[in-house]
Image (cartoon, helix red, strand yellow):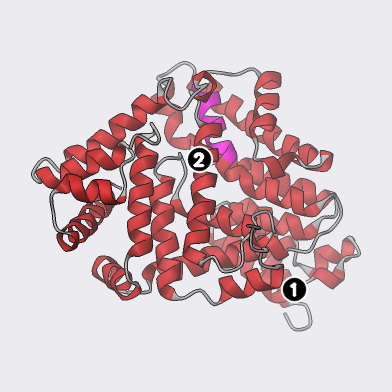
Amino acid sequence: MRTKPDTLLNLADAMAEDILNTPDDEILREVEEDFGDPRALANKFDQILERAEKQVSAPARSVASPQVRSSLLDLPISLRGETIRWVEGIFDFGGRLSEFLSSLRPRTLAWSATAAAVVVLVQAAVITAVLMREQGASSDLAASVAPRTELIPDVAALVAGGRQLIVAGDIPNARLVLEQAAIAGNATAALELGATYDPTILQEQAKTDMADLRMARLWYEKARELGSIEAAVRLERLRSLPGG
Amino acid sequence: MSEPPPLSRAEIHNAIKFLTAAEKTKIVKIAARYAKITPYEAEDLYQEALLRTMEGRRKWPKGLAATAFFLGVMRSIAWEWKRKDDPLNKDIQDEDVGERPLLDRNHAMTIIKAFDDDPIAKEILLAMAEGARGEELLKLSGLSPTDYESKRKKIRRRIEKLEAETK
C-alpha cells in the first residue's frame, strides 16, 4: 500500500480522483450549492483561459518575444517569493540575482534576450527591495515592511520592464507587462499603457499603425482614476484629435 | 504497444474550446487540490497547464479525456513547483527525508484532525494520506461500496468547505 511518502500529495491525489469520478451534473450542483451559480467555476476557468490564449497568441516580435513574454508574465509569481526573502534579510545582489535567474521556470531562460529582460526587471525589484529594507531597518522590519512586499516590488519591476520594452520597440510585449501592473492599480503603468496606444505619442516613434484611440482613452481614464494628473492632460489632447 | 499519437495544435485548440462547464469545473477543482502542495494559487496552476498545453509543450494523447489529461499535467506542474520553490528543497534529496515532508504531514494532520467527530472518515483519510487507494480503502472503511462512495464524497466536500472558510 505505502506508495508515496508525501502525505499532502497523497491526499490531493485521492481528492482529485474523487472529483474526476463525480458525475457531471453532481459536480455542477456542488458549485451551485457553494456559489449560487453552477457555472461559477467554469466562468473563472474561461477568464483564465482567455488570459492564457492572449499570452500564447501575442505576436512574436523582436527579441525572442515568446520567451520574453513568458518570462515577464511569470515574474509576478517568481518575484513575490524572492522579494519577500530579500526583505527578510538575505541581500547579496550578485548571488541573489544568479540564484533567481537559475530558479526561473525552464522556459524563462531559453534565450539570452530573455535573461536580459529579466535582469532589468530584477534590478528594479532589487532597488525597491533595498529602499524598503533601508526604510524598515531601524524599526521592526517584519511589521513595517512585510505588508508592502506583496505588491510594490513586483509592480515596480513590471513598470520598469514595460518601459524597457517600449524603448526596445517591443510594444506588444510592453502592453502585456504594463497591463498587469495597471490592473494591479499602478497609475504610472496605466499611463504608460495608454501611451502605447496613443497616436500622438506613437507618431513620434513612427509606429502609428499600432495606435488605438479607444484603448488609449480607456487606459488614460484608468490612470486618471488612479490619480494621474498627466492622464487628464493626455485625455484632453486626445479629444482634440479627429475622432477623439 | 505503441503510445497513441498526440493531438495536433488545432485539435488541442478545439478540445479546449469545446470543454463543457462540468469539465471546466472539474479542472478548477482539481487545480485547487494540487495547488495545496505548492505556494501558489489554483488559478496559477491551471493557467500554467493551459499554457504548456497550448504551446505544445505537453503532449495530449489522442483519446485521453480532457479532465484526466489536465489532472496529469497539473499534478506534475504542482510537484515541479513544490520542489523548485521550496526553500527547504535543497536539503531534500529523497522525498521521505528533510523537513518539508514533516511540514506537509502537519498540514495533512490538521485536515485529518477536523474529522475527529467522524472516526470512519478519519480512518479513510489517514489511509489516503499514506497512499491507500480503491479496494484497500473500501475494505478498511468496513462500509458497503455505496456507503463508501457517499462517505468519500462527504469527505471531499467537507475539506473544500473547511478550506473555503479558512481562506
**Residue type for callout 2:** Trp
Q: Quadrant of residue B11?
A: bottom right
User: Which tag is nearer the camera, tag 2 or tag 1?
Assistant: 2
* Residue A50: x %, y % from top left: 58, 68
Question: Which secondary structure type mostly characterizes the magenta part of the structure?
Answer: helix
Seen in the image, is B41 located left or right of residue B138? right
**Residue type for callout 1:** Asp
- Residue wearing tag 2: B79
Q: Which residues are magenta?
A: A78-88
Secondary element type, mark 1? loop
**Towards the viewer: A138 or B127:** B127
Is A133 a magenta residue?
no
Is A83 a magenta residue?
yes
User: How many other residues sit within 10 Å of disc 2, few (<14), some (14-19) or many (≥20)?
Assistant: some
Q: Residue B40: which numbered mark, if any?
A: none
A150 up-or-down from A55: above or below: above
* Residue B5: x %, y % from top left: 68, 64
Seen in the image, is A64 located left or right of residue A120? right
Q: Residue A212: which numbered mark, if any?
A: 1
* Residue A138: x %, y % from top left: 46, 16
**Towards the viewer: A232 or B27:** B27
- Extreme residue toward the bottom, this view: A243
Secondary element type, mark 2? helix
